[in-house]
Image: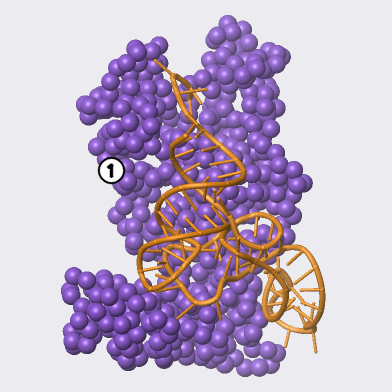
Chain colours: A purple, B orange
RNA sequence: GCCCCCGUAGCUCAGUGGAUAGAGCAGCUGCCUUCUAAGCAGUUGGCCGCACGUUCGAAUCGUGCCGGGGGCACCA
């Protein structure tokens, strides 16, 4: 019996109690679902519900009395071994081993689809993250968004949503010109300008461009700036795409800011905003009245010199996403960009949308980095860059992704690069992957012994050991973990869950022998445990996949 | 001044209104002739920043303080 099945059975019990007149609850106050949770202490049964506490007021009866009425009916449910009333009115439910063990068969039968839920089916979601300037490598500061953004997309998909991963290429504006200027200077053997880019990669890029295009050096300085800028752009974008692919973060859409101008999207966007009546002129500039919608000041769309601002691009971009039919637009931004939130929401509101629904901004705290106990800060312009590529080289994709996904985005991460490089079990990814490898090894040994996992012959009542019950309980939680991770946009819940599952498995493994020893014959108990192992392996693999981390068969 | 985030064990951090607040690391003590010891068992360690409020019930929700971080451009 899965938690979902138990929950709906409890709802039927409630309905029956009302129908028989034992409880008097008005139809419009009756709950549409009954929440159950796994108690922290095993003394409190396999599942507990607070439904009696919540209904006490509506039913005008003391909570324990409501609980008593329900307990009698719950006890009669098939698969339920015992029901206790505890504390102020909790109902603690203990399942029969067979009812609980059945879950192993369910999971093995469903395979990769176990844990896929339908809570977000039919919702179209755009997840925009990283969105760097194409003038340098993807660095450690972007890495968190690469890992978390992709994991959010995967979790939303597992909940049934239709998801687009999108990268907004900031290929327009002053930063790009500074980049071109820096390349030009480097190519001509001169130092980069004060406000330019000083990283060692600038020289490398410049050298590579000159090797391919000697003719650039014959152009006028202004022409050189453009030529180097464009060649550097193409090269850096390619490199960003390659390294992100290596990091298993694939985007569905690479959206160029320039293309918003080339396609006329900016003009159309401005016209649309004007039509909605939130645009006005003042001091020679064109403004959007975002203060109508909670912003603390109005924002400039077109400057006094006739240049459009990034905000004009952002507005056009939102309207473009909207036209492409997304219900929810998620943005992952660093804490230093939190001032954007009200602006983005105001754009949506000016366009006539409800920003509470269509705009979600996840503000992530920055990653602090230490090396040997000493903090260092990233600066692209100064050239202090640790690239994503470096990180992958040092710790590998799995450890990097897992570590970055393991914390809620609003909590700051402190990474000690030396520690991360060590690859010891300080890093929980190894703990989880080890559990998967351990089961895989065991399943190989079982195959050598001609022990097959037989879904037909499986006897769930044999999984009666406490550790088996604990493990089954954790396995049953997985679909709910996926659903809540998706709903809250918090993939770290999956990581934490996997650690809990790995612990439950290791404990089971420690006290329950799975394979027959030596000349021993295989018994139905061995086979039942093998089924449980197979189910656990499946859930570990499914969960790791949501984080984009591999599930190794050997370690 | 205004806005956002954070204050939980020595350290790094979990904990979407539930029962005795958890994990890893660090420290101490045990467990491998048989399925992967990257594991397991035990033990030490807490005014959940402070106060008041809402609730049958608050680390969790609200208000006010205190402390730390970040942000408030006709820059991108």
Is A77 left or right of A490, judged from the image as shown? left
- Name the spot of residue A110 as percent of width and height, x first: 42, 72
Quarter of the image where one finds residue A368: top right
Q: Chain of mark 1?
A: A
User: Residue drawn 48% across and 77% down?
Assistant: A39
Name the secondary structure under disc 1.
loop
From the viewer's perspective, is residue A430 above or below residue A329?
below
Q: How many marks?
A: 1
Q: Residue A104 versus residue A314: which sits nearer the camera?
A: A314
User: Residue drawn 41% across and 22% down?
Assistant: A309
From the viewer's perspective, is residue A124 above or below residue A184?
below
Q: Residue A274 versus residue A114: which sits nearer the camera?
A: A274
User: Residue drawn 39% across and 19% down?
Assistant: A308
User: Residue drawn 37% across and 22% down?
Assistant: A300
From the viewer's perspective, is residue A4 above or below residue B64?
below
Within 10 Å of disc 1 (Cα), the crowding (few <14, some 14-19, many 20+) is: few
From this viewpoint, is residue A93 visible?
no
- Name the spot of residue A416 as percent of width and height, x first: 70, 49
Q: Residue A148 versus residue A522: which sits nearer the camera?
A: A148
Is A407 left or right of A34, judged from the image as shown? right
- Name the spot of residue A129 as percent of width and height, x first: 47, 41
Figure quadrant of the C terminus of chain A:
bottom right
Quarter of the image where one finds residue B52: bottom left
Figure quadrant of the N terminus of chain A:
bottom left
From this viewpoint, is residue A298 visible?
yes
Q: Which residue is mark 1?
A: A354
- Name the spot of residue A396 as percent of width and height, x first: 66, 51
């Amino acid at each position: 019996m899965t938690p979902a099945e138990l929950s709906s059975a409890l709802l039927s019990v409630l309905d029956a109690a009302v129908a028989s007149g034992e409880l008097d609850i008005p139809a419009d106050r009756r709950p549409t679902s009954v929440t159950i949770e796994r108690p922290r202490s095993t003394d409190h049964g396999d599942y507990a519900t607070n439904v009696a506490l919540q209904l006490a007021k509506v039913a005008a009866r003391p909570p324990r009395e409501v609980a008593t009425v329900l307990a009698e009916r719950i006890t009669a449910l098939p698969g339920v071994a015992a029901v206790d009333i505890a504390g102020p009115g909790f109902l603690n439910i203990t399942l029969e081993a067979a009812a609980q063990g059945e879950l192993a068969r369910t999971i093995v039968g469903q395979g990769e689809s176990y844990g896929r839920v339908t809570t977000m089916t039919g919702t179209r979601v755009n997840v925009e993250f990283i969105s760097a300037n194409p003038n340098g490598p993807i660095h450690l500061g972007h890495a968190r968004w690469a890992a978390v953004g992709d994991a959010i997309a995967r979790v939303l998909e597992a909940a049934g949503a239709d998801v687009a991963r999108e990268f907004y290429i900031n290929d327009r504006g002053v930063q790009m010109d500074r980049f071109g200027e820096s390349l030009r200077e480097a190519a001509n053997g001169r130092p980069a300008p004060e406000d330019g880019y000083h990283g060692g990669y600038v020289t490398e890029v410049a050298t590579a461009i000159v090797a391919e295009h000697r003719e650039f050096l014959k152009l006028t300085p202004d022409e050189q700036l453009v030529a180097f800028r464009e060649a550097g752009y193409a090269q850096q974008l390619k490199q960003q795409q390659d390294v992100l692919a290596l990091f298993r973060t694939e985007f569905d859409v690479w959206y160029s800011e320039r293309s918003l101008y080339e396609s006329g999207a900016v003009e159309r966007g401005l016209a649309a905003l004007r039509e909605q009546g939130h645009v006005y002129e003042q001091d020679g500039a064109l403004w959007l009245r975002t203060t109508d919608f909670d912003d603390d000041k109005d924002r400039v769309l077109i400057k006094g010199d006739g240049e459009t601002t990034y905000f004009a691009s952002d507005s056009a971009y939102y309207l473009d996403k909207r036209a492409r039919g997304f219900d929810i637009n998620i943005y992952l931004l660093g804490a230093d960009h939190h001032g954007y939130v009200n602006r983005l929401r105001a754009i949506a509101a000016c366009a006539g949308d409800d920003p509470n629904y269509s705009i979600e901004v996840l503000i992530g705290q920055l990653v602090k980095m230490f090396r040997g106990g000493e903090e260092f800060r990233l600066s692209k312009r100064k050239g202090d860059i640790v690239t994503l590529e470096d990180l992958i080289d040092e710790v590998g994709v799995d450890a990097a992704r897992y570590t970055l996904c393991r914390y809620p985005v609003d909590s700051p991460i402190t990474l000690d690069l030396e520690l991360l490089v060590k690859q010891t079990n300080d890093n929980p990814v190894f703990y989880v992957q080890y559990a998967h490898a351990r089961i895989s090894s065991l399943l190989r040994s079982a195959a050598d012994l001609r022990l097959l996992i037989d879904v037909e012959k499986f006897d769930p009542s044999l999984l009666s050991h406490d550790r088996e019950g604990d493990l089954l309980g954790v396995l049953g939680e997985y679909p709910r973990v996926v659903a809540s991770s998706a709903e809250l946009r918090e993939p770290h819940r999956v990581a934490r869950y996997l650690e809990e599952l790995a612990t439950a498995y290791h404990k089971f493994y420690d006290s329950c022998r799975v394979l027959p020893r030596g000349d021993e014959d295989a018994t139905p108990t061995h086979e039942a445990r093998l089924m449980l192992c197979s189910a656990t392996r499946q859930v570990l693999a499914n969960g790791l996949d949501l984080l984009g981390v591999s599930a190794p068969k050997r370690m």
